[in-house]
Image: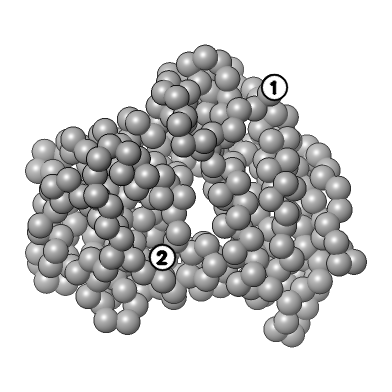
Amino acid sequence: MTETIEWNNLGFGFIPTDYNVRCTYADGKWGELRTHSDMQINLNIAAAVLHYAQESFEGLKAFRGKDGKVRIFRVDENAKRMQDSCKGIEMPILPVDTFREAVLQAVKLNERFIPPYGSSASLYIRPVLFATTPLVGVKPAVDYEFIVFVSPVGPYFKGGFQATPFMLSRKYDRAAPLGTGMLKVGGNYAAGMKATVTAHDNGYSSMFYLDPKEKKYIDECGAANFFAIKGNTYVTPQSSSILPSITNRSLSELAESLGMTVERRPIAIDELSEFDEAGACGTAAVISPIARIDDVDNNKSYIFSPDGSPGRVCTLLYNKLRAIQRGEEPDTFGWTMEVTL
């Protein structure tokens, strides 16, 4: 199958791979990791995850480097973020060691699906933890399943690392996320799908959400954090209703290492006109430079790249982060974990 994959033409979607790794929580404890080749799961029709959305998921990536080595980016941070989600919705805490070992096994078992160095693709890793106890009353389950599967993927936003337009409208809202920010209404991204579809139908990469209380401040777009460049300053929103993005944190640290000032604070809509560059960032997109944000309610546009070219700082941060992920530059931050295949 891998012989037919066009690595440089992959979109961001699911491609079945050889194996997934699972672990069951029952009788008050986590069991041993198990390897499965079956892509299906067997759930009771009353499973709590289907009715009360007691679940959490993460997303991270593995990369094949120029030196042939495979590296996973910030796996322990994803494990800790899932633990925060578990605390927020009364799920058992999955140990970091179990999370890490399951991810390692899933990557090793599916080595042939890791895209080659030099392609625009990577191996996306999806850990998911969900309640399996049959329930018809709203209360925490007692049985859970943890699964890690992988899929080779291309760029998240169409066009890859090119500046694209985003949409802003006060007509759309979504509940403040819980835990990692992955947990929207119903424990997933479903509450934002109408806004996302509307944005795509109108030619935008995504919808931008404002703060849920006053509708005056930028929060994030549906699947990524927001950041902007103002002179020598990296600015990103401070809000309790956005995903605590590991990619955003990494970019902030990179910016500081390059001598930039980092500000995490509320960003008023009108301040968008003062920024030199802007971008959406996350595991899936890394950085998606923003050409402009159209405030469709007020018929106003905030333009960052008239010709669609990524800005200088966005390009610098994007290239440096990718270079670390692919082993092209020394990882002085200790972010990557090499996989022994």
- Measuring 74% from the left and 66% from the top, which residue is drawn there? 92
- Residue where numbered disc 2 is placed: 242
- Measuring 48% from the left and 70% from the top, which residue is drawn there? 177
Q: Would residue 132 be found to the left or right of residue 209 on screen? A: right
Relative height, residue 141 to residue 116 (above, below): below
Q: Residues within 10 Å of mark 2 (few under 14, many from 20)?
A: many
User: Where the C terminus falls, by quadrant?
Assistant: top right
Relative height, residue 241 to residue 61 (above, below): below
Q: Residues within 10 Å of mark 1 (few under 14, many from 20)?
A: few
Identify which residue, 55 or 171, lies in the foreground.
55
Residue 14 visible in this rendered orientation of the protein: no
Q: Would residue 204 be found to the left or right of residue 144 on screen? A: left
- Percent across and percent down for residue 42 are 80, 56
- Residue where numbered disc 1 is placed: 341
Residue closest to the far top: 67
User: Where the N terminus falls, by quadrant?
Assistant: top right
| Disc on res. 29 | none
- Percent across and percent down for residue 277 are 17, 47
Q: Would residue 267 be found to the left or right of residue 195 on screen? A: left
Q: Would residue 198 be found to the left or right of residue 127 on screen? A: left
Q: In what element is the residue under mark 2?
A: loop
Identify which residue, 33 or 201, lies in the foreground.
33
Q: In what element is the residue under mark 1?
A: loop
Q: Amino acid at mark 2?
A: Ile
Q: Amino acid at mark 1?
A: Leu
- Measuring 73% from the left and 40% from the top, which residue is drawn there? 101
- Measuring 59% from the left and 33% from the top, which residue is drawn there? 337
- Percent across and percent down for residue 254 are 35, 40
Identify which residue, 180 or 293, lies in the foreground.
180
- Percent across and percent down for residue 72 are 57, 34
